[in-house]
Amino acid sequence: MITLIHVTKQYENRTILDVPRLTFESGKRYALIGVNGSGKTTLLRLIAGTLRPDSGKIENVPLQNMGYMPQSPYAFDFSVLKNVEIALQKTPQPAEKALAALEAVGLEKLAGARGNKLSGGETQRMAFARMIACPRALLLLDEPTSSMDIKGTDQIENQLLRYAVANECTVILSTHSPAQALRLAQEVVYLDQGKIVEQGSTEQVINHPRVESTRLFLQHWRL
Ligand SMILES: Nc1ncnc2c1ncn2[C@@H]1O[C@H](COP(=O)(O)OP(=O)(O)OP(=O)(O)O)[C@@H](O)[C@H]1O
């Protein structure tokens, strides 16, 4: 179980995140929701270890066995296939596995293309293929389908569910789509100005929010 205890993060004397306690159970899927700037990316980066908290601690993150997909994933200046293969350096048959991951996200036809010349949605699909190319205990995904069309989104959501179940993987993703949270997550964490305002089963938080702030946020939901 990943546990955050008294975690705070500040930028320029502004508190961006203030989490007295938060836990993520192993093998469960979580969605982080909240307005722009509420702290979703900051929370994911703290868990991923690419950012250090100013105070507090984060326990039990499987750092050796986790995948982190940032909002704008990195693409190396070599083939799409090689871009996925870099996640498979210590495993046998990396090219075959990378190709299978590309097939899973519908990108196999671009296996030979330059990784850093892909469109935004294609880059996200390539980065997601990198995530699912090998078994991992934890996936941290920052708005993983934000640039994708509806077909790509559907494909990636199906692959994510399949992968998470097959690998008993913990998933924490941020999303601007409550509908996506309903499709993918068992639990939702609603953030407002760096604080966790509401947390619970996705059905409860999205369809029956108990807190005024969550209700006000979700009343904008049309998609
Ligand atoms: N390096 C930084 N320096 C100063 N402020 C920062 C820095 N990084 C993030 N912030 C601020 O921290 C706040 C939280 O940002 P964060 O990216 O975590 O929000 P978010 O919920 O992921 O937003 P979005 O939905 O727009 O992706 C924002 O107000 C942002 O401006």
Image (cartoon, rainbow, N blue to C red):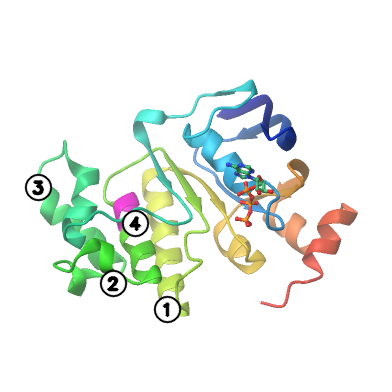
The Cα atoms of the two marked residues, 2 and 4, are separated by 13 Å
Task: Report the residue marked by disc 3.
Answer: 93
Query: Is residue 141 something one can see in this rendering?
Result: yes
User: In front: mark 3 or mark 4?
Assistant: 4
Under circle 4, the secondary element is helix
Residue at image mark 1: 151
Please name whichever residue, 177 or 202, is drawn nearer the observer in this view of the structure: 177
Q: Are marks 2 and 4 in contact (CB under 8 Å)?
A: no
Residue tagged 4: 127
What residue is rendered at 27% in x and 68% in y?
117
Task: Point out residue 20 in the picture as x, y percentages from the top left corner.
Answer: 74, 28
CB within 8 Å, label 3 to label 4: no
Q: Residue at x 17, y 57 (%)?
A: 78
Q: Of marks 2 and 1, which one's residue comes earlier in the chain?
A: 2
Q: What residue type is labelled 1?
A: Lys
Give the spatial CA distance, label 2 vs label 1.
Answer: 10 Å
Evaluate if marks 2 and 1 touch, with contact meaning CB atoms under 8 Å apart.
yes
Q: Could you tell which of marks 2 and 4 lies nearer the N-terminus?
A: 2
Element type at mark 3: loop
Query: Which is nearer the eye, 81 or 157?
Result: 81
Q: Quadrant of the N terminus?
A: top right
Q: Who's the residue at 24% across and 62% down the image?
A: 115
